[in-house]
Image (cartoon, rainbow, N blue to C red):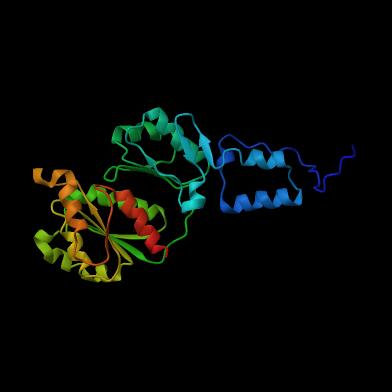
Amino acid sequence: MIRKKSSARKSTQRPHRSKPGQQGKITPETLESILRQFKTGTISLEQALERLKAFPFADLGFAKVDLHRRMRKGFPEVVFAGGKTIDQLTKIIKCLDQAGQNVLATRVEPEVSKRLSKSIPGLTYNPLARTLVKQNEAVAKRPGTILIISAGTSDIPVAEEAAVTAALMGNKVEKSYDVGVAGIHRLLDAKDRLHKARVIIVVAGMEGALASVVGGMVAVPVIAVPTSVGYGASFGGLAALLGMLNSCSSGVAVVNIDNGFGAGFLAHLINSL
């Protein structure tokens, strides 16, 4: 049998060996470069596979870290720290860090943050938001402003989680805290900021009325975040959630109870349109 010669040129380069942790550093630009090199025969199939071996996820056994998410969603996988051991968190965050991706971990308790910071240099902890951040890649700056409002001081931790999330994604963030309906004049004092914002996040517990008030004042999207702040009949935020879902103001969307991260991400997507 006569075998046909392959039309692809054989590479004269040495096989590419990825440094530990670097095989996951895949961006749209590097992926395009790898495909072009393979197409032109500059690298072999084996070399291309070696560079892509941790793509689209890194299997750590107990977790499959989604290294492809930045390409699909515009931002890397975010780590929810609740329920994870120190060892699990360390390995997951190191995986993202070594892949050159930005790191955001939420619901990180102070003692956990101290232990993680010892083994992973460069992490920044926000004690109010309970977030750990490390920015390895520059992100494009968004032109609009995201305004984050809290009804009370007790709602600030959830508001700060939203603020950290939106800021890390390249958004300009402004804040106006403790402007709830019990003293509506405090909100009216910030009316100029309300009308200049591209999107507004309203964080409120108790009965959650602030979202409806803000929604009735502005022409931009309002993202309502119910919090678990309140007395017994607030049912851990359920009263605020139902109040926000039943808002008569147009343009109000609602995320889950205490979900500051979800509100910050959604506000980022709106501000990116």
Residue 101 vertical placement versus 200 (above, below): above
Q: Is residue 150 left or right of residue 137?
A: left
Q: Which residue appears at 45% of the width and 32% of the height?
A: 91
Q: How many marks?
A: 0
Quadrant of the rendering where the N terminus is positioned: top right
In the image, 111 versus 61, the foreground residue is 61
Q: Which residue appears at 80% of the width and 43% of the height?
A: 10
Q: Which residue appears at 12% of the width and 60% of the height?
A: 181
In the image, 222 versus 187, the foreground residue is 222
Location of residue 236 in the rendering, given as x and y in whole percent from the top left corner: 17, 43
Q: Is residue 221 left or right of residue 27?
A: left
Location of residue 71 in the rendering, given as x and y in whole percent from the top left corner: 52, 51
Location of residue 241 in the rendering, given as x and y in whole percent from the top left corner: 20, 52
Q: Is residue 3 left or right of residue 254?
A: right
Q: Quadrant of residue 187?
A: bottom left
Q: Is residue 71 left or right of residue 107?
A: right
Q: Quadrant of residue 185?
A: bottom left
Quadrant of the rendering where the C terminus is positioned: bottom left
Location of residue 249 in the rendering, given as x and y in whole percent from the top left corner: 21, 66
Q: Residue furthest right?
A: 2
Q: Residue furthest front?
A: 1
Q: Which residue appears at 15% of the width and 50% of the height?
A: 239
Q: Is residue 205 visible?
A: no
